[in-house]
Image: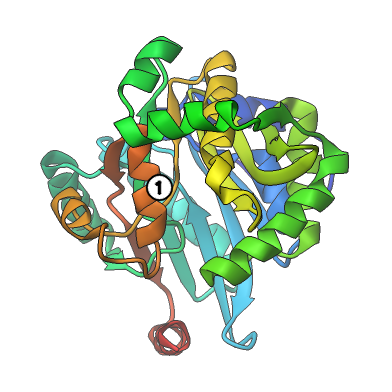
Amino acid sequence: MLDKILEIGERPYSEEDAEWDNFVANHPHGSILQTTNWARLKNRFGWTSHRVWMRKEGRLVAGAQVLYRSAAARLVKIAYIPHGPLVDWDDEEQVTILLNQIDQSVYERGAAILKMEPLLWQSEATTARWQAICQQQKLLPNTDTIQPPNTVLVDLRPSPDDILANMKQKTRYNIRLAAKKGVTVRQGGLKDIAAFNKMMRVTGERDQFGVHTPMYYLAAYEIFEPMGQVALFLAEYDGRPLAGVMVFAVGKTAAYLYGASSNEERQRMPTYAVQWAAMQWAKDQGCDWYDLWGVPDASEDKLEANFTNRSDGLWGVYRFKRGFGGQIQRTIGATDRIYNKLVYKLYQWRRNR
């Protein structure tokens, strides 16, 4: 059933890439992180990538795009499948065959650890099934995550008025207040990445979190824009950019991956205006869901009980994102496949530091 192990790199976009991306877009667990362009982006910043896929009766039915990178002062090489593999987890034979072929890819490239983070939403049924799969396939569940497991999904299927009505009253008020206070939002282009990068640096310093290099956001826009998979929105007042978001769309989901704001005119609520513009764009693209991407890894009860008095980590982010009226969803988390126990201990020590 194995069809290809395909190197992606910087080669021209091919028919095979188009077929893969169509598969990702239509898969129930598909994600922007499994697209060809995501591999191209990561290839520019220290990762290599390979793709394994499977066919049945000529039809692509399962696969994984695997990223590789050296870690722990280059002493450890890890393999990573963000939001994958894409497989029917209820089909034991399909899962076994695909994991065996992933093992082969990992072995040939000398990685000691494989980390997988499937985009499977947690529920009693999926959690029980996932635990059984991990036991059957000798996977170590509940390991450290790279992508945030907890997110907020906004349903874009209702009318714009109903989407607004589903938001918290304060958020809805702030969106309208921004317009009253003269904030305008426009869709930007490549020439606006410099302004976005400047706001990203300010945001990182203000909120104390790491940001990518300016070249990263430029590359992300350059790679995804030709296929209409990314949009940059800027909220401005008096010609000055006050906030910006970069949103990526694939299939029925748009994901808010990067956002920034200046320290100026914050009372004009530009961050609310720019998010609302991005949601309307996503709806126009045919997306059913707007993924606000990352909130603290806690239950909804704990989030609601603590967001008013906590500002560490992603808690301030949750206070903002909860207002848009979405539903909290958590993935089943990360799982590791260990090929070298000694190296895995070194990896854990490095991650704990």
Q: Nearer the viewer, residue 236 or 225?
A: 236
Instruction: Answer left or right for 156 relative to 218.
Output: left
Residue at 44% x, 41% y: name it.
Answer: 292
The residue pinned by badge 1 equals: 320
Q: Quadrant of the C terminus?
A: bottom left
Estimate the x, y position of residue 69 in percent, counting from the top left: 63, 70
Residue at 38% x, 84% y: name it.
Answer: 341
Estimate the x, y position of residue 161 in percent, counting from the top left: 40, 12
Residue 34 seen in render: no
Instruction: Answer left or right for 348 relative to 226.
Output: left
Residue 312 seen in render: yes
Instruction: Answer left or right for 229 relative to 25.
Output: right
Residue farthest to the top, as pictured: 159
Q: Nearer the viewer, residue 203 or 223?
A: 203
Residue at 22% x, 54% y: name it.
Answer: 303
Q: Nearer the viewer, residue 212 or 79?
A: 212
Residue farthest to the right, as pictured: 191
Residue at 42% x, 26% y: name it.
Answer: 289
Please tell me whether residue 184 is drawn above or below residue 69 in the rendered image: above
Please tell me whether residue 96 is drawn above or below residue 202 in the rendered image: above
- Callout 1 crowding tier (Cα within 10 Å): few <14, some 14–19, many ≥20: some
Please tell me whether residue 197 is drawn above or below residue 35 in the rendered image: below
Estimate the x, y position of residue 203 in percent, counting from the top left: 61, 61
Asked which colour scheme the image uses, the reply is rainbow
Amino acid type, label 1: Phe
Q: Secondary structure at mark 1?
A: helix
Please tell me whether residue 50 is drawn above or below residue 18 in the rendered image: below
How many numbered marks are there? 1
Instruction: Answer left or right for 56 relative to 190.
Output: left
Estimate the x, y position of residue 2 in percent, counting from the top left: 53, 40
